Amino acid sequence: MSSLRSAPPISASTTFSDYAITTATRLLRSADLDVEQGTRALRRMLSPWGARRIGTRPGWHSDVCADGSPIEFSAAFSREGLQLRVLVEALPDRPSPSSAQRAALALTRGLIRDFGAVGDRLAEVSDLFLPDEDPTGFAMMHAAALTPAGGPEFKVYLNPNADADLTGIERTRAALDRLGFAKAWTAVREYAGRGFDLDRIVYFGLDLTDGPQSRVKVYFRHYDASPAELDARMEISLQHEAGFLGAFCRQLTDSDGEVRAQPLVSNLTFTTAGGHQPVSATLYVPLWLHAASDRTVRDRVSSVMSGMGLPADRYRTLLNRMARRPLSSGRGIHTYASARVQHGRPRLTTYWSPELYDRYPPARYQRG
């Protein structure tokens, strides 16, 4: 039996479920979270495609990770506690957008049936993001948040460029309108102040929960943008505390000015309680192209967390449970780090790839 300090290798016969359940168990135990509850949710998210062998190259190049892996783990650290998350893209039977859409819808139905996920708002916009004819790109990604209190909470990420009939701009605006956030479009348009070519809408997120705090998120990919510029624009949200993100990005990338190797990502979050103004804005800093190895990234993240008063030791422990190789021999584990400070309370999240196919993944989502 493998010890908690030595992640088992992936062999030719390893299945996606083998890898994911083993890794999740290690992370959940280390985080003092409910292993049975967390792995039960993950098994459902991996059904039925988790029984397939991982192989040496992706049969469907997933949008989840830079190397095409369809599974991503992440950990959110705050002074209030630790939250583990897992993101998956249900693998289709055949490598086609239509088949991917069927797999995603089957997973959604399973989460509603087996875990009480709420799909009402998703149903309101399904025809926009899940077209019957000629879909393009990914269909839907599913995430579960695992916390000490309560069961897993699920959310989905939808594709604004789901087909050629509507642009991502038109589709996002129509979805906000249907969900009762028509006036929120003013904030979205103002936030994308350089135009939607440079501040490109790339994901539309929905919590599969109910209530006034249930979130609707619009995600952007920012080309040739400086963190300081985004920091200033994030003041459009109700809870943003300006002046932090420039230094955060500089410490993680070891670079001043615009981030060009891999574009920055951000989101605006809306809730019924918050009305038409975003209740928060979050910046996601790409990490895998800004350091020679994951060891360098680990040291940078640890330094940032210590400066924020967050438990860098817990981050390093979880990272060691995640890694299946020395951190110095690749740079593909860390994908992004995100942070925000609200009412003086910092929160940082790190996102980890399993590197199922590449420990030196190339750049993705380049302009043009």
Image (cartoon, grey):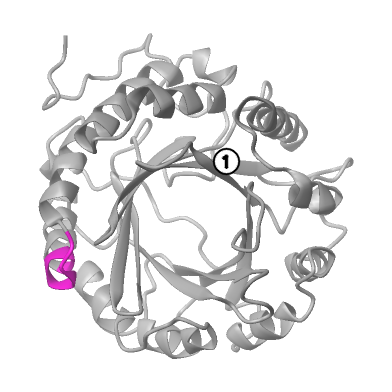
Residue at 64%, 34% in the rendered image: 116
Q: Position of residue 295 (x, y in %)?
A: 12, 50
Count of marks, rendered view:
1
Q: Position of residue 360 (x, y in %)?
A: 29, 44
Q: Quadrant of the N terminus?
A: top left
In this picture, is 331 found above or below 10? below
Residue 108 visible within the image: yes
What residue would you read off at disc 1?
142
Residue at 35%, 41% in the rendered image: 148
Q: Main secondary structure of the magenta part?
A: helix
Q: Position of residue 141 (x, y in %)?
A: 59, 42
Q: Position of residue 147 (x, y in %)?
A: 38, 43
- The quarter holding residue 302 reads bottom left
Q: Nearer the viewer, residue 68 or 28?
A: 28
Tell me if residue 302 is in the magenta stretch: no
Left or right side of 106 for 349: left
> Which span is picked out in magenta?
304-310
- The quarter holding residue 154 reads top right
Left or right side of 176 for 354: left
Residue at 65%, 84% in the rendered image: 187
Residue at 72%, 57% in the rendered image: 161
Q: Nearer the viewer, residue 345 or 360?
A: 345
Amino acid type indicated by mark 1:
His
In this picture, is 308 found above or below 98? below
Which structural element holds mark 1?
strand
Badge 1: residue crowd in 10 Å (few <14, some 14–19, many ≥20): many
In this picture, is 242 found above or below 113? below
Residue 54 visible within the image: no
Q: Quadrant of the C terminus?
A: bottom right
